[in-house]
Amino acid sequence: MTFPKNFLWGGATAANQCEGAWDVDGKGESIPDHMRAGGLHKRRVMTPMIEPDGYYPNHDGIDFYHRYKEDIALFAEMGFKVFRLSIAWSRIFPKGDETEPNEAGLAFYDKVFDECKKYNIEPLVTISHFELPYALAENYGGFANRKTIDFFVNFATTLFKRYKDKVKYWLTFNEINFGTLPMGGRNLLGILGEDDEQRRYQALHHMFIASAKAVKIGHEINPDFQIGCMLAYITMYPLTCKPEDVLASQELVKKLNWFCGDVQVKGKYPYYMKNYFAKHGIQVDFEAGDEEILQEGTVDYYTFSYYMTSCVAATIGESDDRVGGNLFGGVKNEYLETSEWGWQIDPVGLRFTLNELYDRYEIPLMIVENGLGAVDKVEADGSIHDDYRIDYFRRHIEEMDKAVEDGVDLIGYTPWGCIDLVSGGTGEMSKRYGFIYVDKDDEGNGTFNRSKKDSFEWYKKVIATNGADL
Ligand code: BG6
């Protein structure tokens, strides 16, 4: 058995995908509150107004807001040491630009953290998980506007002060590297209008500054805080060993996977992005003092989501099959299977990724999202036999184990959607990740009752044996 004794086994969620109660107790509207449901071949549409006849799946989520006690008790039954959740920004600052927080919102998370404490579950808090208050996007242009740095810092500082004795592990932004892509402009950066690389990279710069400022302030408030970055890591292989393919994949890896981590861990922009900006006429405005802020606000640990890997070719031929993904699709890898949603399953790639990352950054790593989105069938007796999910996790944990043996400092693992929740990409419920089933369908019908899948007992055993019995 190689996992360290205090390894943080647990699960991960995000407020907008599970809380529901979207307009309760003073909460303001967030970007996901404006998103209608989509599907595998249907993009989610964001509407400027909430349309009375429209279905917005995040509005009721899985009603975690009212059922958190039951859910946390189930997590405790599985033996969770850590529970990753995010804080709905618009529950605390409904429009984002207020100076004083909404007490009812803060009180809710007090109750959630107290419940975790009851079972010795360590909360791991993502400060912002694609949940910008809609008003900040509408009135300020989201992070494209430098003012949004201050709004975020005020939000983070409020949380650090309020929960300084309840929360130790923090992440500033979920999947910050989403910001390099067009779809990230809207969801992550809050750019509702015209979205080009110039605006995106400037907005991303503001996020780096906001994150670094928060890290510094957090450490001043409580030196024991562990504050990390979070990226969507899509390992990319060259499609062939043709040098042009190898080079093309390296180029993309730098831009998509390395750039944001390099800034947040090393505290400065890497040479290859400065070069990319110069070549593409992109001008990222730095204010006086920004370089120091980045240097003073480097993160304590590196976290990432890992669902799949992809392939890159210098030129894509007509016969090359494309595959899907949460951040980036790519060319099909003939050695890998795909999920029902077209994401390539690659457990060995996780060991490779862990070694790559540890070698690059030499700080503790945590996998804060991993899992299989799949359709589950409820049997007549209510049981759910999700052996495909168990198989997915087993094979990934085996490779984590080997990476730890390789010497990687891996400190935790929080599978995504440990309880079924609304899919971020498609808004579906039928794309299920959980050990716990939630009775809600793609139209929002159902009792919202919770039940255990076979993977529930399996994961419980994995945690109880610290990863030895898979
Ligand atoms: C990650 C996000 O990109 O992938 C989550 O951080 C998201 O919010 C997860 O839910 C899985 O993606 P999807 O589209 O299957 O929900």
Image (cartoon, grey):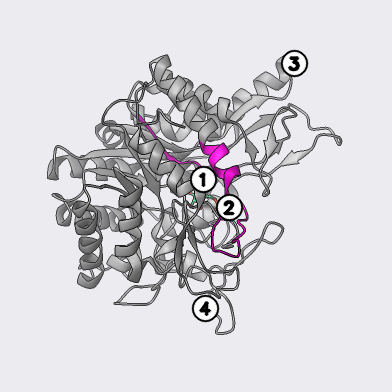
Image quadrant where one finds the N terminus: top left
Quadrant assignment, res 364: top left
Query: Measured along the vertical axis of the image, is residue 254 above or below residue 118?
Result: above
The reply to whether residue 369 is visible in this rendering is yes
Of the numbered discs 2 and 1, the one sitting upstream in the chain is: 1
In what element is the residue under mark 4?
loop
- What stretch of residues is rendered in magenta? 365-393
For the residue marked with disc 2, what is the amino acid? Met
Residues at marks 1 and 4, CA–CA distance in whole angstroms: 25 Å
The x and y percentages for residue 374 are 61, 51
Q: Where is mark 2, residue-wise?
A: 183
Say which of 247 and 225 sits in front. 225
Instruction: Mark 1 or mark 4: name the one nearer the start of the chain.
Output: 4
Please give the residue where the numbered disc 3 appears in the rendered image: 242
Look at the numbered disc 4 and say if its residue's Cβ is closer than 8 Å to ligand 1.
no
On screen, residue 31 above or below 13: below
Q: Secondary structure beneath disc 1?
A: helix
User: Per the image, is 389 magenta?
Assistant: yes
Q: Nearer the viewer, residue 299 or 443?
A: 443
Mark 1 vs mark 3: which is more N-terminal?
Answer: 1
What is the secondary structure assignment of the residue under circle 3? loop
Q: Residues within 10 Å of mark 1 (few under 14, many from 20)?
A: many
Q: Earlier in the sequence, mark 2 or mark 3?
A: 2
Measure how far apart labels 3 and 4 are at the Cα level: 50 Å
Which residue position holds label 4? 50
Residue highlighted by disc 1:
178
Q: Position of residue 455 (x, y in %)?
A: 49, 47
Callout 2 touching callout 1 (CB < 8 Å)? yes
